[in-house]
Amino acid sequence: MLYPVFLMKALCFALFACAFNLMLGFGGLLSFGHAAFFGGAAYITAHVAKVWGLEPLLSILLGTGAAAVLGLVIGWLAIRRQGIYFAMITLALAQMVYFFALQSPFTGGEDGIQAVPRGHLLGLIDLNQPLNMYYFVLAVFLAGFALIFRVVHSPFGQALRAVRDNEPRAVSLGYRAERLKLIAFVLSAALAGMAGGTKSLVFQLASLTDVNWHMSGEVVLMTLIGGVGTLLGPVVGAFAMVMLQNYLAEFGSWVTIVQGIIFVACVLLFRRGIVGEIQARFGPPAR
């Protein structure tokens, strides 16, 4: 019923937004540099798939691991600050990743890594077939979403919410706030990397767009439109944004203006986001 590439792109960005929401909605950490993990993993996945000839699942896992390591480094430096200072540190470090991608030989500079082979999943399933690739992307998204669901509803997730709501009180009860936030940051970075690596195989391309600060802004917008702190909100927001970009592409640069208008309307009319407002009016309030 729908174009497979559109659905695959939407699923990749939905996983990216869910990963970001794990940190913002449940950890209270606003990052402006999440494109570093998304794009960094895209480059690693594309490189090992094209140059090393690894199969797609292993390529994505290597990209995810690289994003987790990068998240550990950036998180260790950033979580010592809070609020706008935390956001600015993540943005600055993400820009360093962007300039590394621009100058490094293996990334292809402004051309990026093109013609990335999709390969055969486990040596058996040809991912060059659109339907096979779609089901693979769907499986990756569901695995990532299930992990986020489990983390949110685990004792760790409850402790993370406690730190988000009242950090001094959580510390007084014996929780190590910095460790909890760092773990959440690394998990979020790894899942964002999984989304970026999958996206590089879908479009057979890893480019500077993936690590640009605009990408970090888009994932913030997706999460806010769908509903911060809800499990399904980022999914709805990602599908809405991808749909707008897809159907308004003929308007060129006006797409960003339309996105801005929608963002302002959502902030004024739907303070909790689409899913958050639905839960507030027709179901239990978002936690």
Image (cartoon, rainbow, N blue to C red):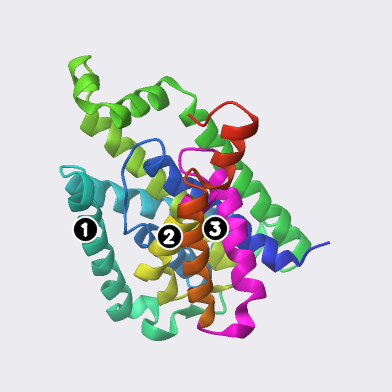
Callout 2, which amino acid? Phe
Quarter where residue 94 is shown: bottom left
What residue is drawn where x is 59% and y is 84%?
A: 251
Please, is residue 43 above or below residue 69 in the view? below
Q: Mark 2 points at which residue?
A: 38
Q: Mark 1 points at which residue?
A: 88
- From the viewer's side, name the closer residue of 177 and 203: 177
Boundaries of the magenta span: 224-253
Q: Earlier in the sequence, mark 1 or mark 3?
A: 3
Q: Could you tell me residue 106's position as x and y percent? A: 36, 76
Q: Mark 3 points at which residue?
A: 13
Of helix, strand and loop, which one carries label 3? helix
Q: In this view, does 171 lie to the left or right of 49?
A: left
Callout 3, which amino acid? Phe
Callout 1, which amino acid? Met
What residue is drawn where x is 23% and y is 27%?
A: 167
- From the viewer's side, name the closer residue of 52 and 235: 235
